[in-house]
Amino acid sequence: MVKSNMIKKITNKQQYHSAMAEIEGYLQKGFSNLTSTEEDHLEELSKAVEAWELKEYPMPMQPSFPDILIYVMQFKRYTQSELSEDLAISKSLLSEILNGKKQPNLSIVVNLHKKFGIDANVLLESVSG
C-alpha cells in the first residue's frame, strides 16, 4: 500500500483524490495494523491533504464584535474614549461590549458600519453568532 513516490505536496485535484483514497485504505486497515512505514506515509498524506484543503477550501473565521472594535481601535489608533465618542456611546458601555458583558444595540452596529465602512453582514453575523 505504500507508494514509492511519497507525496510532499498536492498540486491538483487528481493528486488530492488519490491521496484521499490511500488514506481511506489505511483507515480500513486500522491503525494498529499499520507498519511504521505505512504510519509515516499516512502522516505525510494527511499533512499534504490538510495543506491542499486549507488552500483550496479556506473557511474564513468570523470575528466577534469585540474583535472588530479592537481592530478599529488599532487601525485608527483610537483609544476607547475616542471610539466611544465616534460611536456616540458611553465609555462604560464600550468597555462592557469589549469585555463581552453586553451586546451592541442596532444603532451601534449601524454607526460602526457607516463611520468605518465595515461590511454590514460581517457586523450582523458577529452579534448573531
Image (cartoon, rainbow, N blue to C red):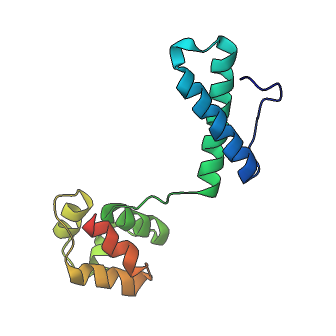
Name the residue rendered at 66%, 33% in the picture.
Answer: 22
Name the residue rendered at 21%, 78% in the picture.
Answer: 89
* Count of marks placed on residues: 0
Spot occupied by residue 75 in the image (x, y as percentages of width and height): 48, 68
Of residues 96 and 106, the one nearer the viewer is 106
Viewer can see residue 88: no
Spot occupied by residue 55 in the image (x, y as percentages of width and height): 64, 54
Of residues 111 and 126, the one nearer the viewer is 126
Position of residue 10 in the picture relative to residue 61 (left or right) = right
Name the residue rendered at 58%, 57% in the picture.
Answer: 57
Q: Looking at the image, is 10 positioned above or below residue 110?
A: above
Q: Looking at the image, is 119 positioned above or below residue 125?
A: below
Tell me the quadrant of the picture where the N terminus can be found: top right
Quadrant for residue 18, please give it: top right
Quadrant for residue 73, please give it: bottom left
- Residue placed furthest toward the bottom: 114
Spot occupied by residue 104 in the image (x, y as percentages of width and height): 21, 72
Viewer can see residue 65: yes
- Residue placed furthest toward the right: 5
Tell me the quadrant of the picture where the C terminus can be found: bottom left
Quadrant for residue 67, please give it: bottom left
Position of residue 98 in the picture relative to residue 19 (left or right) = left
Spot occupied by residue 95 in the image (x, y as percentages of width and height): 22, 62
